[in-house]
Amino acid sequence: MEKQYRLPLDLMERFMVDVFVKAGVPPADAAVCAAVLAESDKRGIDSHGIGRLKTIYIDRIRDGIINPVTKIDVVREGPTTAVLDGNDGMGQVIATKAMETAVAKAGQYGTGMVAVRNSNHYGIAGYYALMAIRAGMIGITGTNARPSVAPTFGIDNLLGTNPLTIGLPTDEEFPFLIDCATSIIQRGKVEVYARQRKRLPKGWVISRKGKSKTSAKAVLKALLKGDAALVPLGGIGEETSGYKGYGYATVVEILSAALQGGAFLTALSGYKDGRREPHRLGHFFMAVDVAAFTDPAEFRKTAGDILRQLRNSATMPDHDRIWTAGEKEHDAEVERLALGVPVDPVVQEEMIELKHRFGLTQYVFPFEEEVHDKKRRQREERERKAELRRERKRKKKESPA
């Protein structure tokens, strides 16, 4: 049984900043990128935090898929709108600039909307809705993504997991924040299942024959090859309304591509003629100033009253609590700020690898000795098996015909 390790959030965030800087990201931008990933870990969204530091960002910078120095061009701008081109830079930096622009326009005119093209994975969408909430506004954002979701009755992975995220200020300790994919599961959650060696429930992923696939590790490989597809919210077919998730995913795809003249569907795969290329994702951001409609305190109280009435309603016999969107993440934040963020064995190995790759010797993680011993045992086991194979070959050669 592998020991559970927790690390202080501020330590993890500092480490991520230093890794981004070593990878060529300017310090101010590195701080933005690390803050987005740390927000995910803090809120208990392990699929989009430090677990993606190496594979989604650092490795792609190394491979020339992401530009570490982000140059943002304003393509078009009006009083309440703007279109930005991220030039394949850091998604978090581009998205932060876009929501800041939307909030500024909303502060002046009541609403603001910004569309983005040629960006990259921007972390949890909820981070940008929270930016608007902190300004006393409603925040809305969405992004397309590399293809992994099949349309209803289809088997080709054409759509991304395409989150449609909405955040609303309330009078409670936490806002209302619905931040989820328009598919039953997103690729990052499959990655978490693979790291934890857990099987996926049936009905989340389908093969090209339309049958469920449950091996998380195999699904990750199959998604890249187009041999599997995630299922839209609602499930397979129309019986449980899978067309609803499919429809909302398509809305996000259009708003993430058509407004800004960006790439869409299979053009977001990151491959062309068998070669890696930038993903060129698109995003959209909306900010709505509550004060342009009503008294902000009254809005927050009404929103809070609605949430409290929902939570205080009768529960099913085998359940003792009802949550509203954003509450579980708030609970996770309270716990993780106090106890630290759990780091699974795969992420432990990736952190050590990045530490050594970039010479960040000032960091000493509590799991390093255990990981070192594990790798030593694995190496010894490989050597033992190799020796057994060599011994069998020798005996085969020596045996009489």
Image (cartoon, rainbow, N blue to C red):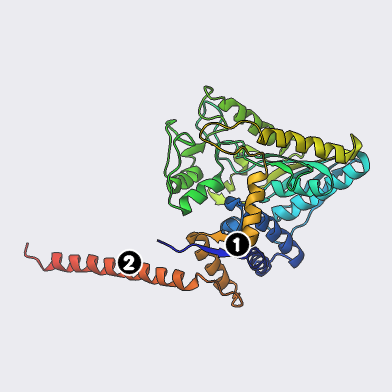
- Seen from the viewer's position, the closer of residues 336 and 355 is 336
Where residue 67 sits in the image (x, y, percent)? 69, 58
- The residue that appears at 61% across and 36% down in the rendered structure is 182
Which is more foreground, mark 2 or mark 1?
1
Quick one: label 1, few (<14), some, or many (20+) residues within 10 Å? few
* Residue 125 percent coordinates (x, y): 69, 46
Residue at 42% over, 31% down: 209
Amino acid type at mark 2: Arg
| Frontmost residue, 273 versus 8 | 8
> In this rendering, is residue 8 above or below 299?
below
Quadrant position of residue 163:
top right
Q: Position of residue 382 (x, y in %)?
A: 32, 66
Q: Residue at x 73, y 52 (%)?
A: 87
Quadrant (top left, top right, bottom left, bottom right) of the C terminus:
bottom left
Q: Are marks 2 and 1 in contact (CB under 8 Å)?
A: no
Q: Is residue 43 left or right of residue 208?
A: right
- Is residue 62 in view from this perspective? no
Is disc 2 placed on a helix, strand or loop?
A: helix
Q: Quadrant of the N terminus?
A: bottom left
Left or right side of 285 for 346 = left
Q: Position of residue 51 (x, y in %)?
A: 57, 57
Q: Which residue lies under the disc numbered 1?
A: 339
Q: Is residue 382 visible?
A: yes
Query: Is the residue 105 above or below the residue 27 in the image?
Result: above
Indicate which disc residue 382 carries.
2
Question: Residue at the top extreme?
Answer: 239
Circle 1: element type:
helix
User: What numbered label is drawn on residue 247?
Assistant: none
Q: Amino acid at mark 1?
A: Leu
User: Crowdedness of circle 2 by 10 Å Cα count: few (<14), some, many (20+)?
Assistant: few
